[in-house]
Amino acid sequence: MALWIQAQQLQGDALHQMQSLYGQHFPIEVRHYLAQWLEAQPWDALDLENQQDEFKAKRLLDSLIQELQRRAEHQMGEDGFLLKIKLGHYASQLKSTYDLCPLELVRCVKHILYTEQRLVQVASNASSPGAGPVDGTPQRYQQINQTFEELRVMMQDTENDLRKLQHSQEYFIIQYQESLRIQAQLSSLSSVAPAERVQRETSLQSRKSTLESWLTREANTLQKYRQELAEKYQRTLTLLRKQQALIVDDELIQWKRRQQLAGNGGPAEGGLDMLQAWCEKLADLIWQNRQQIRRVEHLTQQLPIPGPTEELLTELNATVTDIISALVTSTFIIEKQPPQVLKTQTKFSATVRLLVGGKLNVHMNPPQVKATIINEQQAKALLKNENTRNDSSGEILNNNCVMEYHQTTGTLSAHFRTMSLKRIKRSDRRGAESVTEEKFTVLFESKFSVGGNELVFHVKVKIYCLALSFVEFLFIVNSVKYICDELVVLCLVQTLSLPVVVIVHGSQDNNATATVLWDNAFSEPGRVPFVVPDKIVWPQLCEALNMKYKSEVQSDRGLSEDNLVFLAQKAFSSSSNNSEDYVNMTITWSQFNRESLPGRNFTFWQWFDGVIELMKKHLKSHWNDGAILGFLNKQQAQDMLMSKTNGTFLLRFSDSEIGGITIAWVAENPNKPGERMVWNLMPFTTRDFSIRSLADRISDLNHLLFLYPSQPKDEVFSRYCTPPNSKAVGDGYVKPEIKQVVKVEFSSPNPEPSPGNSSFIEHAASPTISQPHNFTIYPPMNDSMLETEGEFDLDDTMDMARQVEEFLSQPMESQWRGQQS
């Protein structure tokens, strides 16, 4: 069902939220009449931070306007006439609004579609209890929304109580003024005749006594009202703290964790729109409660009554200030992280965002954000509130940016588009630590004030308690005036990026990526920068490797259990094929990317990263097709192939070469008729596939017939083969062609081998290659393998040495005669 159809079925608060998405910036009528067209456009393919995408955004804007105009032209009838005018007006309006900034249109539409999708999903999960996504997301949302409703009711209740208190106090002051008038009348009786004075004095004293008794009781009542109201604010602020902790300490921290895992190839962290909506609701409630508390304070200043209320109100004011300060500082986040492997002298970008910036009107005086790179020790000192204001570990160019407010989405953010790390200052390394293990972080900081001017009618009242049964109020109005009572919360907001590894050359990228992957996968929330465990259990690493592999290769086909067993065998130098044997085994950082694998000059990660690079650059399609088994050793390949017909082959990753893949196939031994062998072609690398693709190479070799287990190779690879060159030659030159053949004759059941396939490897000369790569095949050895990799076999080596020694001991003439014959 189309998203717009589902959005129209929303009810209650969800419907109001959906309707609030639209306005002058994007009319809801445009959404309605162009629903199908809007949802079919590639909005997500455009990067809002990439100015090069502005041309694509402009084309989308032009297409939108053309679609509106086309719809307007096709309107018929009386109602159609009005709609025609309206749609034409909207087309002109959108053109004038976004013509100079088409990326803002993309931002607006992406925000609308994402919010609608979220509202529809939450509504459908609420209506279908069993259909909710894993981890109970709708239940958490429901809990947060219920708490907001509870807070709204509590705030309305305190507002009603505050009005009641205000009315009672106003009436109290009126009655007190009446008592002053009676007192004045009593004082003026001295000039009245005695008979009349006695009569009037008795009446006035009676009224005064009654009024003072009422004032005493009412003063106690007012004090009780104030106390009860202050206690209600205490409960409200406690619930606000709890709600803020749930949103900021749970939901926002989970979003940050998803963002961190996304750096390892995990699913996207998701939009911030819902989190911003919650944070803005929090800010609104906190601010309204603060306003109410201030009004109670002013009432107590107008009519001071001795009691604990004033002290309690002072505590409440401090509490509400702390809450709003914590909300502002914790919602200053990095929406788009800088690259975690950061090369000097290279441009990079980042985006920071203040989730409550629009609600607290921070954008009225847009703050400036500064970016600084600091090392691990400086980050630790910063979190301890030690003075590190002038400390940095390098120089970042274009590191200042003003936060911009986007009216269409209500977001306040700063987009650093052209930062560049000019230089880096490294600290002393410890032990075996390399430069690619040193972690830095980009510190983003800003300073701004939250608050504004409030005009308050200020009246002072002093109360003296003269006796237990009598209270005389001295009503002193110093000066009735309006004063500027300003709450200014000066916020120094700071946020740290994910750990960054700085490199100066592309050759360091491999090891730097390992440091980042380990940190992203295994760091814990709230850690001391940038502490990470030195060892973890194998299943944890499997999860991280699988996530990285799927992301880099862009495949839904991840690492199977057999693949992970193969990797465990490599990491632990083990021969066990049982996955259960590795469940409780731990692997250290040194085993992962510091110590070389036995008999090799590279680490476990370097080998795995080489596989990733090979796959994503050249073999992604073949992996997705299931054509590459990959994670096999020689013995496993031999066992699998020996039970198949001749010409069956498979593809496996090389053990001896980083980023290499070899073809293993079963065929007759040309030197021993009737004997079958498994052969391994020397590994191909990225360099080889940049010359000729895997599909073309397999097509060249006619003795390769079936992809394991029994699929004809043409069914798998023919669609990826390069079309043959045209015979027409326009410039007088014949274009050479690279072909691959093997120097050994293999018996093949194929009755019609393709012409041109000889019994040796040959590369035609290429105009772009000065040194053609020759693929040679070694004579068969005792292990029936052509690839010179695997474990070192002393016996085989000694046999070969003896053969060479015998050959060299022969007279030179006999050697030449033997070769000529």
Image: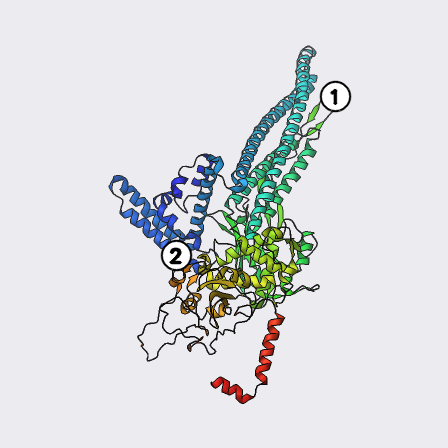
Mark carried by residue 41: none
Q: Amino acid at mark 2?
A: Lys
Residue at position x 38%, y 43% from top? 2
Closest to the observer, 470 or 811: 811
Q: Secondary structure at mark 2?
A: helix
Vertical order, 593 against 207 (above or below): below
Residue at position x 25%, y 39% from top? 78
Q: Residues within 10 Å of mark 1 (few under 14, many from 20)?
A: few
Closer to the chain start, of discs 1 and 2, is 2
Q: Secondary structure at mark 1?
A: loop
Provide residue 44's location: percent of width, then percent of height: 44, 52
Q: Which residue is mark 1?
A: 468
The residue mark sitting in front, 1 or 2, is: 2
Residue 79 makes an appearance in the image: yes
Q: Which residue is mark 2?
A: 58
Q: Amino acid at mark 1?
A: Leu
The image quarter containing residue 356 is top right
Provide residue 57's location: percent of width, then percent of height: 40, 56
The image quarter containing residue 695 is bottom left
Quadrant in which the N terminus appears: top left
Provide residue 815's location: percent of width, then percent of height: 53, 86
Q: Is residue 74 left or right of residue 457?
A: left
Q: Residues within 10 Å of mark 2 (few under 14, many from 20)?
A: some
Vertical order, 666 against 733 (above or below): above
